[in-house]
Amino acid sequence: MYEFLSGPGLRIAFTLFFGGIAIRATSLYQLSRVKDKVVYNHINWGWGLKSIFYWMVPWVSASTRRQPVFAFMVFLFHICLIVTPLFLNAHNILWDENLNLKLWSIPNWLADMLTVALILSGIFLLVRRFARPEVRILTGFGDYALLGITMFPFLTGFLAYHQWGHYETSLILHMLSGELLLVMIPFTKLGHAFLFFFTRVFIGFEMGGRRGARSW
């Protein structure tokens, strides 16, 4: 199982990941040309890029300033989610062996800290969904499941690295859940990882290019 997941399985997961992103982005673009073609009359890349930038900086947009703790946890969760798997030394070995891709590696102690931070911030976001009625009413089983699926590779990877419990089981679960997460991103709500940019640009065109108003 390890040989498959670390070789063909990894390549299949990345193929579905990038292929799914390309297919979904293309289909949404084509749909927008039909349903929202008026937006293209107000294309202004200055406003579009500002819309992305100001939503990616903590406590700049009005909504993040109104909920500073929530905003901090969301930014922390996403930073850890991106940085840890991309720059983990053990992952870089797999990138090099299977994709001929070499990235800078972070120290293992920092990867540990980022993993713990992701798990804690993920628990915060999970509890918030239960505790806040206005959030709970909009949350379905799938939302809880996706949050759990996102956190599971980090939990199993942490257990495997520190060899807490059965090492081989933790390692297999880590690789399997990580590749499952990759495959699910383009086809579920996790697609906001790339659709965020698509949406923010369109809102920037609409609010800034058409109305001359900020969208953050």
Image (cartoon, helix red, strand yellow):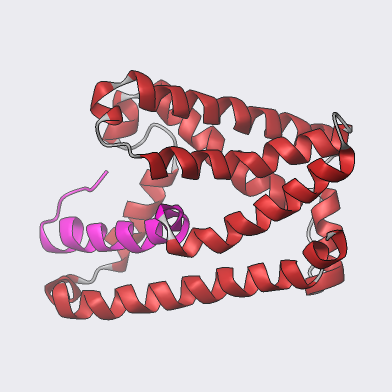
Q: Position of residue 133 (x, y in %)?
A: 26, 22
53 relative to 58, above or below: below
Is 102 or 46 nearer to us in this picture? 102
Total residue callouts: 0
* Magenta stretch holds residue 160: no
Q: Position of residue 124 (x, y in %)?
A: 49, 23
Is 179 left or right of 69, judged from the image as shown?
Answer: right
Q: Main secondary structure of the magenta part?
A: helix
Q: Quadrant of the C terminus?
A: top left
Question: Magenta region: which residues?
Answer: 189-216
Which residue shows up at 31% across the image and 67% down it? Answer: 45
Is 146 or 213 nearer to us in this picture? 146
Which residue shows up at 29% across the image and 25% down it? Answer: 66
198 relative to 212, above or below: below
* Magenta stretch holds residue 212: yes
177 relative to 67, above or below: below
Which residue shows up at 80% across the image and 55% down it? Answer: 91
Residue 133 in view (yes/no): yes
Q: Position of residue 114 (x, y in %)?
A: 69, 34
Quarter of the view holding residue 205: bottom left
Residue 79 in view (yes/no): no
Is 152 or 100 nearer to us in this picture? 152
Quarter of the view holding residue 57: top left
Which residue shows up at 23% across the image and 27% down it? Answer: 134
Is 199 left or right of 165, judged from the image as shown?
Answer: left
Q: Position of residue 89 (x, y in %)?
A: 84, 50
Q: Quadrant of the N terminus?
A: bottom right
Quarter of the view holding residue 77: top right
189 relative to 118, above or below: below
